[in-house]
Amino acid sequence: MSRHADWSPNLASPRNLRFGALVLLLIMVNQINDPLVDPTLGEALVFWGVRTFVLICGLWLADRLVSRYLAERLATPEWLKPVVLVSAIGILPLALTEALLELQLPFRPEFLDDELWAVSPVLAVLGEWVTLASIVIPIHLVLWLIIDRNTHKTSEPNLAVAQSTPEFLQRTANLRAEDVLALQAEEHYVRIYSSEGSELIHCRFGKAANEMPAELGLQVHRSWWVADSAVRSAQRGSRRWQLNLVTDVAVPVSDSYVSAVRERGWLKRKVRK
């Protein structure tokens, strides 16, 4: 099973939409207060390209760091501190890059406070980080509220959707969508777990997972879809999270799905001793 597939980006995911919107908004803010002084077209392209690339990489790496090592240790509210941490950590490479750009580029972009720089370069970089944080963190929080919270907001299930039978379930012994506890890919087949046991049908996993109502559960791995009612507890292994289902099946959670799983509150379901 290739790990590359687990890291493949889903450009329509709330996290990636949020990061894209954040980068675009920051570029617009910088255009209003342009720090460049009479650059050539080539210099301007290098300047904006480097800063945009560093910002994207910084946010992505910070999100991985927070999701993998920090978020499960944070107190409630579960959404606030991860977003603030990702913002604060993600802009640190940008602050350092801006310091290097100001020192190295011939057309002198104005980022750092010259008075602070005269006292201490570290204080000047820290001052630029504080300035960036005061812009990025509020924008990031607003984008989270607009994009992620509306996407993952818990609400009463749509009974009309939940009670409808997905096409692939019509090949089973009278299973309905709400009866499904989990779906597992097995080559060209899908294993369907329910309270009655498991059943194997010939179907593409992607098709089956897409037909399941979003209100009932979500895909957590390239080979697994899990229902909310099936998750008994979650625990962190040596390399990744896993969900323990009521069927005594342990389901791995891919890194690319950890944020969505956390939004459903599944990672807070602890093993009872």
Image (cartoon, helix red, strand yellow):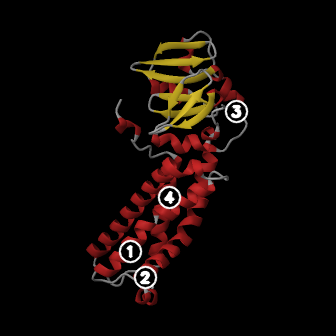
Q: Residue furthest top?
A: 173
Residue at point 56%, 24% (across, down): 182
Query: Mark 1 vs mark 4: which is more N-terminal?
Result: 4
Q: Dot 3: within a 10 Å radius of its alpha carbon, few (fewer than 14), some, or many (20 or more) residues? A: few
Q: Amino acid at mark 1?
A: Glu
Q: Secondary structure at mark 3?
A: loop
Asked if the residue at tag 2 contacts the one at tag 1, i.e. Cβ–Cβ closer than 8 Å, the answer is yes
Query: Mark 2 vs mark 3: which is more N-terminal?
Result: 2
Residue identified by numbered label 1: 98
Query: Mark 3 vs mark 4: which is more N-terminal?
Result: 4
Residue nearest the observer in this picture, 101 or 240: 240
Residue nearest the observer in this picture, 168 or 264: 264
User: Is 3 on the left or on the right of 252, as rendered?
Assistant: left
Q: Amino acid at mark 3?
A: Asn
Nearer the camera: disc 3 or disc 1: 1
Q: Amino acid at mark 2?
A: Leu
Q: Is residue 22 above or below residue 190?
A: below
Q: Secondary structure at mark 1?
A: helix
Query: Mark 4 vs mark 2: which is more N-terminal?
Result: 4
Residue 34 can be seen in this image: no
Report how far apart the C-alphas of labels 2 and 3 lie in the structure.
Answer: 53 Å
User: Is 27 on the left or on the right of 270, as rendered?
Assistant: left
Q: Dot 4: within a 10 Å radius of its alpha carbon, few (fewer than 14), some, or many (20 or more) residues? A: some
- Image quadrant occupied by the C terminus: top right
Residue identified by numbered label 3: 158
Residue at point 47%, 76% (across, down): 126
Residue identified by numbered label 2: 112
Q: Amino acid at mark 4?
A: Ala
